[in-house]
Image (cartoon, rainbow, N blue to C red):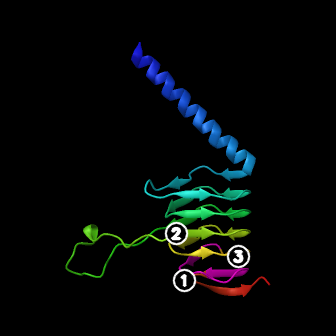
Amino acid sequence: MIHYLVLVKRLLQKVFNSFLVRENCIKKNILISKGFNKSRKNTIRLVGSNIYFGKNCHVGANVTVSSFVMVASNVSFVGSDHDISNPDEVMFYSGRAEMRDIFLEDNVWIGHGAIVMDGVSVLEGSVVAAGSVVTKTFPKYSIIGGNPAKLIRSRL
């Protein structure tokens, strides 16, 4: 009987907690589509409102998201790479560099299949073209694209 009550309690907590998350997302107008995948070691902080994540996005870094941010499908936020400086060491055991955070400021649009590397800030009003690999931070209101991403033009 006790085992049954513990299971019911856990089920109610799970339903209640997911309800709170869902209610909070509704109040802040946050939509995260199916297939969203976050690495267990990383955090995503949704500090703003009016946020959209398309299908199959992957978060493998610590990401902070401001308001009015659109992230298309299949976008990846990638953490630090393996240390490859010592050729005598097996890469599998080489370890990783310290991970730096990714920031998505207000009014940002990230196109389908883009990759944003750790340590990058996508600044206010910027657009990242589909399929781009963003390895550095660009000025506010930039349109960037390519691999590696380059400044295409300013929106100002």
- Determine whether 94 is above or below 31 in the image: below
- Per the image, label 2 sits on a secondary structure element best described as loop
Q: Which mark is residue 101?
A: 2
Say if the magenta span includes residue 137.
Answer: yes
- Name of the residue lying farthest toward the right: 156
Q: Residue at horizontal 73%, vertical 51%? A: 28
Q: Residues within 10 Å of mark 3 (few under 14, many from 20)?
A: many
Q: Is residue 144 left or right of residue 97?
A: right
State the residue in front, 129 or 61. Answer: 61
The main secondary structure of the magenta stretch is loop
Q: Which residues are magenta?
A: 130-145
Q: Quadrant of the C terminus?
A: bottom right
- Per the image, label 3 sits on a secondary structure element best described as loop
Q: Nearer the viewer, mark 2 or mark 1?
A: 2
- Per the image, label 1 sits on a secondary structure element best described as loop
Mark-to-mark CA distance, 3 and 2 = 18 Å
Residue 116 on image: x %, y %: 55, 72
Of the image marks 2 and 1, the number of the one nearer the N terminus: 2
Q: Amino acid at mark 2?
A: Asp
Q: Which residue is mark 3?
A: 126
Q: Which residue is mark 1?
A: 148
